[in-house]
Image (spheres, rainbow, N blue to C red):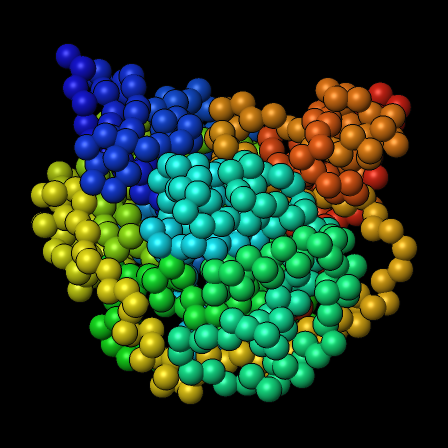
Amino acid sequence: MPHVTRSHCRICTNQCGITLTVDGEQIVRVKGDFDHPLSKGYTCPKGRAVGRLHHHEQAIVRPSIRDGGPPRDVTWDVALNDLAARLSRIVEEHGPNAVGFYFGSGLGMDAAGFRMAEAFYHALGHPPKFSPLTIDGTAKVLVSSLVGGFPGLSGKTDNENVDMLLYVGVNPVVSHGHNTGMFSPPSWIRAAAESGQVWTIDPLRTETAAFSTRHIAPLPGKDYAILAWLVREVMDGGPLTPAQPLQGLDALRGALQGYDRATAARVAGVSEDELDDLLAAVRRFGGVTVETGTGVTMSEGANVTQWFAWLLNILTGRMNRAGGVWFHPGFITQYDSFELPRMDNPFTPGAPTMPDVNGIIGDWPCAALPGEIEAGNIRALVNLGGSLVRSFPDANVLVPALRKLDTFVTFEVLENETTALSTHVLPTKDQTERPDISFWDTLCGSLSMLYSPAVVPPRGERRSAWWIVSQLMARMGLPVPEGLPESDRTPGADDTMLARQMAGARCSFEELQASGTVSRPLEFPGTWVDRHIERIGGWILAPQPLLELWAKTRADDDAQAGPPPLSFIPRRQRRKLNASLSFLGSPADIILNPQDAARHGIAHGDRVQVTTPNGAIVLVANVSDTIRPSVASIPHGHESANVNLLTSVQSVDTMTGMVRYSGIPISIARAEDTQPVRDAAMA
Ligand code: SF4
């Protein structure tokens, strides 16, 4: 008899409530939970696909080992003993730093599994660590640290009260989890544009731009020119109405001296009239709330753009004030319950093979992984739910390097190119098979915590990630956290592990488990934020590393000559999340401006070969005037056209280790006029 179970989606951090209709072990329907107190029925196509994900024909349901030949299914004992012996030997012969860790998004949404993986990493003495941070987001941590004196300051727009909102390189209609935190984004944006104004800056007229009051389409990665000019105008003619103390205003004035409208328009490739209109709107509303996304953080101009975005929020009094930006205090770790330490230096040691590139808050640049393997520094890799081949830069050098690893273990639920390269594949419970909490509490749009029970039994031999990792630690002779349940198959064991994560949270695990969703009132403006900023002497407007970067950026722009080359920007798709959920059928398309298409003899629907010095891929032409001339848009990590065959491990921001994923020059031609593309990486 079918029954309905309430749960929450863990594809992204938005925390949408869902209901699953289950018949026996079959999930027959997934839809939005209209009784959910937060999302009230909203879901996106990704969340409604968790049933298909569970029943997918490429689901991994047994552990396997590949040692020279094709992979063979083995028992858990065989897999874990073999893996533990190999990792122990590598540690013994080469030291723990020969074992790299990738904390991927897959295990990132598994609270108990992620925490146990962290325990494993700590027990090994903090060996090389990689995460999606250097794939899409170092600028935010950098600026929170340098300007706000704390890397955990996670700002969100006060959507309820915002009047003048400026989206820069962010498309919340598609990407509304992962820090934005928004349900039914079109309704929000339409309402904000009706009651005030919403401006979007993006080379592509995105779904968000279509709902906005105005859209400005700059050259890729040059948004900073518009924001820098606005900052200077605000300092010179207002509205200069900061809500907290400032430090470094004179140094900032000096850095922006002479940055006039003509310069900004030239560098950004936009008209001076557009800039005038934007400034007039900012002055009319007495300020501006700026929100950025991966369109900014994946570009070469990421750090200065993010800096100027913060400066506009700070200088026009939008930081920690109604209608501006609120800062998430956390539900488990409560930033408002203690005195935040001053942490204004996010830089940490990086990879030996990239000595000029910083690490950031303990992460090594993802771009360094192939070089570290080739140098023999990293001999084993523990991949915690990451699609490396489609998310790391430069698959051309990454894939051959991964093949050279002595041991490459991947925790996954579905087969993909990365599992095909792994020596050990360990299947973990998917989100319908395990209970969980909304672990990334500061990335959602409210002060809340969710709990969902398991909905169906695990397929095949899948086990809880926390159990797998703890077993591996024990078999390697590493100290395992005390008091663990004996097995994940003991009734209630997964819940026991979740209860451990909730220690010291704003509610008990029992309260959370009983109600499913617990929300607490948000203190806004947060006195903890103002107190922190006062304690550090005010917002740090002009940190030296950013001043130096800005001077270099200005000099590079002044030296720039000639028209911009055709270059690509990355794009998220509504029916795919980065490298996952390809089975939902999002097209491998390249959006091209009609002028660029015509110049290359390309018609809508043609197959287009896109080439960089690194490699080539073939996509389908989507000829549209929604994109500005000289820019093309290519989806993230597509199964049939991996954009990371075009990117380069050499193109790295030395300040943060962030790879350049946007504004990369390309050549295009009709595929039938070119040599067939051979996937050098996977051959
Ligand atoms: S927005 Fe995120 S949490 Fe909500 S249904 Fe979509 S993928 Fe799931």
Q: Nearer the viewer, residue 590 or 611?
A: 590
Name the image quarter holding the N terminus.
top left
Give the residue at x 39% y 22%: 52
Q: Is residue 311 above or below residue 484?
A: below
Q: Nearer the viewer, residue 226 or 486?
A: 226
- From this viewpoint, is residue 377 visible? no
The count of marks equals 0
Give the residue at x 59% y 74%: 237
Q: Quadrant of residue 94?
A: bottom right
Give the residue at x 63% y 55%: 277
Horizontal and vertical percent for residue 561?
Answer: 89, 60
Q: Nearer the viewer, residue 61 or 28?
A: 28
Horizontal and vertical percent for residue 90?
Answer: 51, 58
Horizontal and vertical percent for residue 40?
Answer: 25, 35
Give the residue at x 9% y 43%: 514
- Looking at the image, residue 539 sits to the left or right of residue 252; the answer is left
